[in-house]
Image: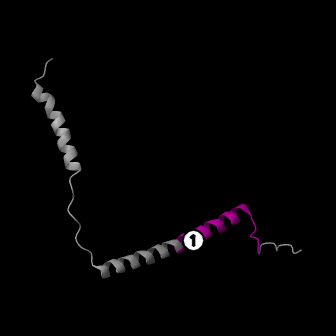
Amino acid sequence: MKAPKFWMVVPALLVAGAVGLAYAKLPAPPPVDPAKAAEAKAKAAEAAKKETEQLAKSQDRVVERYKKEKGIKAASAAPAAKKK
């Protein structure tokens, strides 16, 4: 079956157009107020700190539960190093 050359070029043009749209330059973002940026950064840092503390607490709870279920006794202190 022989297709006219025009119909063979159409898919190539569609692909070229799609690639051109994909690589189109986006407009620049609006300018950011430095005070708002600093405030947002501080809030993000505080949230990360709280999240880290919550993670540590939950990990401690899991370790304690594991030790309790396995019957592992917690060592009260590390053995002292021998002095020469």
Q: Secondary structure at mark 1?
A: helix
Q: How is the image coloured?
A: one colour
Image quadrant where one finds the C terminus: bottom right
On screen, 17 above or below 51? above
User: Residue 18 location, x and y as percent?
Assistant: 20, 44
Please state if 29 lies on the left or on the right of 58 as rendered: left
Q: Which residues are magenta?
A: 53-76
Please state if 45 lies on the left or on the right of 83 as rendered: left
The image shows a total of numbered marks equal to 1
Q: Closer to the camera, 71 or 39?
A: 39
Q: Residue at x 49, y 72 (%)?
A: 51
User: Residue 11 location, x and y as percent?
Assistant: 17, 34
Is residue 55 within the magenta segment? Answer: yes
On screen, 46 above or below 70? below
On screen, 34 above or below 20? below
Q: Residue at x 22, y 70 (%)?
A: 30
Q: Closer to the camera, 13 or 61?
A: 13
Q: Which residue position holds label 1?
A: 56
User: Residue 58 location, x and y as percent?
Assistant: 57, 69
Q: Closer to the camera, 17 or 50?
A: 17
Name the dominant secondary structure of the magenta segment.
Answer: helix
**Identity of the residue furthest to the right in this view:** 84
Q: Residue at x 20, y 53 (%)?
A: 24
**Identity of the residue furthest to the top in this view:** 1
Q: What kind of residue is marked 1? A: Ala
**Identity of the residue furthest to the bottom in this view:** 35
Image quadrant where one finds the N terminus: top left
User: Residue 49 location, x and y as percent?
Assistant: 49, 75
Residue 45, image quadrant: bottom left
Label 1: how many Cα within 10 Å (few below 14, some 14–19, many 20+):
few
Residue 14, image quadrant: top left
Is residue 81 within the magenta segment? Answer: no
